[in-house]
């Protein structure tokens, strides 16, 4: 049943239980609850803070709880475990909630849903307050992955993957950054305004915002906002898009008048950016396997005043569905694990397994080969993901190049010298939350000879 309550802790508990039981995305369930209007005032901020906080910090919370509860956590009733996580999150990570309120509200919540666990919840949370300075964490020298995982709330297998690519301090910094709330980044719609004008409008309206370092269209907004209430939203002056994601369309660099394909386009973040770069002149086809997602792209295009964009259903595993005629530029923003965006979708890190990464990488290799059949001779293919895993990134590109001697990797260092700090030595794009305060993204630019 859909949650419906004026109590932010109860609403958070219901959403967390629903995510654990049925899957689903935290941001959508949160929006759905807020739209009902039961939560008012500061509770509208506390409710998402609690849901996202518990999802982001679940690993560390459970590591601590395991030292305070005298039976395995998975033997607790789901409601009791969720209330414990919520209570501990408030005690360990939030400054503004008095300790007594965090404990008492947790006990009250238990009284309504799991009355027999009230005593345990009270005892465990009070025990935390007494013992918090004596809690233990794995020794980094003996077990580096377990140590980072427990301190910074990441699955151990994921930290082990990061340690395969980064040294210990960097892997730890990445884990730490990946447990934090990401910035709100917008892309100015240059079909209707400029970045400077948008910044001026925000300043005049009392909203603090600064230009992004790399994307010439990006602005980072300070504080928390409901997007539709920001100035210029209704007029289509901007859309929400992380800076790393904005860089991808820039690397494809479509020129006005060209024929361009975005073949995994929904919900349209990069497709609408491509239309901007085309200055609304040319032929932009945005396709996706999901027929139901296409209206979202159309609506985004309409709001932003784009009229060079058409949409169609295409399954990249079924060449008989492909559009005919070659394209000058093709973007393949492949379905991926999303390991680079776990700041935004923290529920994903607790669901994914290493097997998922292997399965996704196999599909990505097939999609890349199929997308390449739609590129004209001399044309460009950009392959991108929002994953940090090598299997989904460099290894897909290496596999592709080994099977396609008619393609070469273009070195982004030479093409975009202003953004060198975002590129690997081989010239591929790798954005990292801890280095660039951007989502974890990958892109490689391939040219068909
Ligand atoms: C990473 S998302 C794309 C995000 C989009 N480029 C943006 O910037 O807003 C990947 C998309 O690939 C689509 N997809 C998954 N499997 C596909 C397939 N076999 N063929 C075409 N699209 C597929 C999904 O529906 C999803 O919308």
Image (spheres, rainbow, N blue to C red):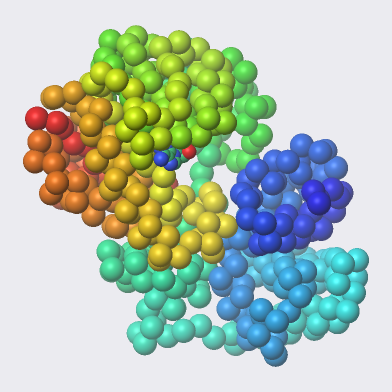
Q: Is residue 77 above or below residue 378?
A: below
Q: Position of residue 294 (x, y in %)?
A: 52, 27
Q: Position of residue 219 (x, y in %)?
A: 46, 31
Q: Residue furthest toward the front?
A: 320
Q: Position of residue 237 (x, y in %)?
A: 52, 18
At x 48% / y 32%, what residue is drawn? Answer: 266
Q: Is residue 320 left or right of residue 95?
A: left
Q: Inspect this view and state whether residue 213 appears.
A: no
Q: Quadrant of the C terminus?
A: top left
Q: Is residue 153 above or below residue 144?
A: above
Seen from the viewer's position, the closer of residues 353 and 124 is 353
At x 28% / y 34%, what residue is drawn? Answer: 371
Q: Is residue 195 above or below residue 385?
A: above
Seen from the viewer's position, the closer of residues 163 and 97 is 163
Q: Inspect this view and state whether residue 257 appears.
A: yes
Seen from the viewer's position, the closer of residues 213 and 142 is 142
Q: Is residue 110 left or right of residue 413?
A: right
Q: Is residue 161 left or right of residue 272?
A: left
Q: Position of residue 380 (x, y in %)?
A: 20, 29
At x 36% / y 18%, what residue is drawn? Answer: 284
- Which quarter of the frame holds ligand 1? top left
Seen from the viewer's position, the closer of residues 291 and 22 is 291
Q: Is residue 422 left or right of residue 263?
A: left
At x 61% / y 75%, what residue is drawn? Answer: 62
Query: Where is residue 109, by image quadrant?
Result: bottom right
Counting every numbered tag in the picture gives 0
């Amino acid at each position: 049943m859909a949650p419906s309550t004026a109590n932010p802790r109860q609403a958070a508990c219901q959403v967390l239980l629903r995510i654990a039981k049925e899957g689903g995305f935290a941001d959508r369930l949160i929006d759905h609850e807020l739209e009902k209007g039961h939560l008012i005032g500061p509770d509208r901020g506390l409710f998402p803070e609690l849901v996202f906080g518990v999802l982001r910090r679940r690993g560390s919370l459970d590591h601590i709880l395991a030292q305070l509860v005298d039976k395995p956590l998975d033997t607790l009733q789901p409601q009791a475990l969720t209330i414990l996580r919520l209570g501990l999150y408030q005690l360990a990570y939030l400054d503004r909630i008095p300790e007594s309120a965090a404990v008492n509200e947790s006990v009250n919540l238990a009284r309504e849903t799991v009355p027999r666990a009230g005593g345990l919840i009270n005892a465990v949370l009070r025990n935390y307050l007494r013992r918090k300075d004596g809690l233990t964490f794995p020794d980094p020298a003996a077990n580096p992955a377990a140590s980072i995982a427990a301190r910074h709330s990441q699955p151990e297998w994921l930290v082990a993957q990061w340690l395969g690519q980064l040294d210990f301090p960097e892997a730890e910094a990445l884990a730490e950054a990946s447990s934090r709330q990401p910035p709100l980044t917008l892309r100015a719609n240059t079909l209707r305004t400029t970045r400077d004008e948008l910044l001026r409008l925000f300043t005049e309206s009392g909203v603090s915002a600064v230009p992004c370092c790399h994307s010439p269209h990006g602005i980072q907004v300070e504080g928390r906002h409901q997007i539709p209430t920001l100035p210029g939203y209704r007029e289509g002056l901007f859309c929400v898009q992380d800076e790393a994601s904005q860089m991808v369309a820039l690397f494809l660099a479509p020129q006005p008048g060209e024929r361009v394909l975005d073949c995994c386009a929904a919900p349209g973040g990069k497709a609408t950016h491509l239309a901007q770069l085309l200055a609304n002149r040319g032929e932009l086809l945005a396709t996706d396997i999901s027929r139901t997602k296409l209206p979202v792209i159309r609506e985004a295009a309409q709001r932003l005043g784009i009229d060079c964009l058409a949409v169609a259903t295409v399954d990249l595993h079924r060449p008989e569905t492909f559009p005919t005629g070659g394209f000058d530029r093709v973007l393949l923003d492949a379905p991926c694990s999303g390991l680079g965006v776990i700041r935004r979708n923290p529920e994903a890190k607790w669901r994914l397994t290493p097997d998922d990464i292997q399965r996704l990488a196999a599909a990505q290799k097939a999609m890349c080969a199929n997308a390449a059949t739609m590129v004209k001779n001399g044309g460009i293919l950009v392959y991108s993901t929002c994953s940090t895993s090598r299997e989904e990134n460099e290894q897909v590109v290496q596999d592709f190049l080994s099977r396609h001697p008619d393609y070469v990797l273009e070195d982004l260092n030479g093409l975009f010298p202003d953004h060198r700090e975002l590129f690997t030595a081989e010239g591929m794009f790798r954005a990292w939350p801890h280095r660039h305060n951007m989502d974890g993204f990958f892109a490689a630019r391939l040219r068909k000879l």
